[in-house]
Image (cartoon, helix red, strand yellow):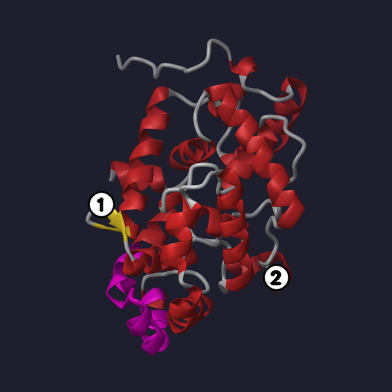
Amino acid sequence: MASRPKLLMNSPVNVLHDKRKASVRIKREGRFHKVSNISDLILTEANFRDARAMHEKESAIVLDGARLSDNGLFRGMAYCLLTPFQQYDGQIMGFGIIRPFCSPETAFANQEGIGQALKNSGVLFHEQKAKCISELGRRWESLNLLNAVETGIKSGAESEILLRKFIVNYVSGFGYKTASLFLRMSGAECLVPVDSWMLGMLYLHGYPCEIPRAKRNLPRWRTDVLSPKLRKQALSGRKYLEAEEMALDLAKKYGVPGHILQLAFYTKKSSYQSMSSG
């Protein structure tokens, strides 16, 4: 008989924000997040090993050798632009196909080719994502991101926050989550990419947050039934920052950085598991 994964906490109660709310929410909506009881929420050492392995894998995208590079950062941004409303397996397939296009000049000149490649690999909203990648190539030199990222990630939380805000304001297709993901891949340690999995886990732990689209009770990749308004629904501004603080609070209970906590939930609950075991 296989041994049970070792828990990092003596009791699930240690990581719940509100046990009563957690119990009610799990009973009412847990099935939509692959959670049937409180113990399903609890992360183990194995979950954190998976999280660190995925972090290393994604960080390698932005590196040439062991250093950040201009083309590496462009690859990282293209990778992040594929994430919205996309399961992990489709994202990886799409990125693998468009990787030869992932330099600024090539991307700018090949919007149609990128769009067709993404469509062929089943990436959702392939036209919009191809447009964002091509536009990024057109503006790449003026953004001067290599210098900004190398400086910002070495200067602490405040600099990382300002750098994220710059990306959200000036790079088409990037919101708080995708900007946080990109910077985490590039070496930032103080930001949390609060995706739908992370938000769902915070909600089920009893934190005072809401889940966009939860009332529809539909998978987020079912684009045929999502209205344009609903597709655009995402955390932004104050609500995102509030959710990030909740994620950091939960991370402290586990004794891990916030971005590793997010990856632990993501690798445990998303299609990453089917990819890694296949």
The three-letter code of the residue at mark 2 reads Ser
Q: Which mark is drawn over residue 66?
A: 1
Residue 109 appears in the figure? yes
Would you name the residue on which mark 2 appears?
227
Q: Nearer the viewer, residue 32 or 96?
A: 96
Residue 32 appears in the figure? no
| Magenta stretch, residue numbers | 93-118
Tell me the distance, in whole angstroms, between the alpha carbons under discs 2 and 1. 43 Å
114 in the magenta segment:
yes
Q: Position of residue 112 (x, y in %)?
A: 41, 88
Choose mark 2 or mark 1, whichever is in front.
1
Q: Which SS class for mark 1?
A: loop
Q: Quadrant of residue 105?
A: bottom left
Q: Residues within 10 Å of mark 2 (few under 14, many from 20)?
A: few
Q: Nearer the viewer, residue 209 or 157?
A: 157
The residue positioned farthest toward the left in the image shown: 65
Q: Quadrant of residue 49?
A: top left
Which residue is located at x 38 percent, y 42 percent?
273
Which residue is located at x 51 percent, y 77 percent?
132
Q: Position of residue 6 (x, y in %)?
A: 41, 16
33 in the magenta segment:
no
The three-letter code of the residue at mark 1 reads Ala
Circles 2, 1 touching at the beta carbon (< 8 Å): no
Q: Main secondary structure of the magenta part?
A: helix
Looking at the image, residue 189 lies above or below residue 227: above
Which residue is located at x 54 percent, y 53 percent?
180
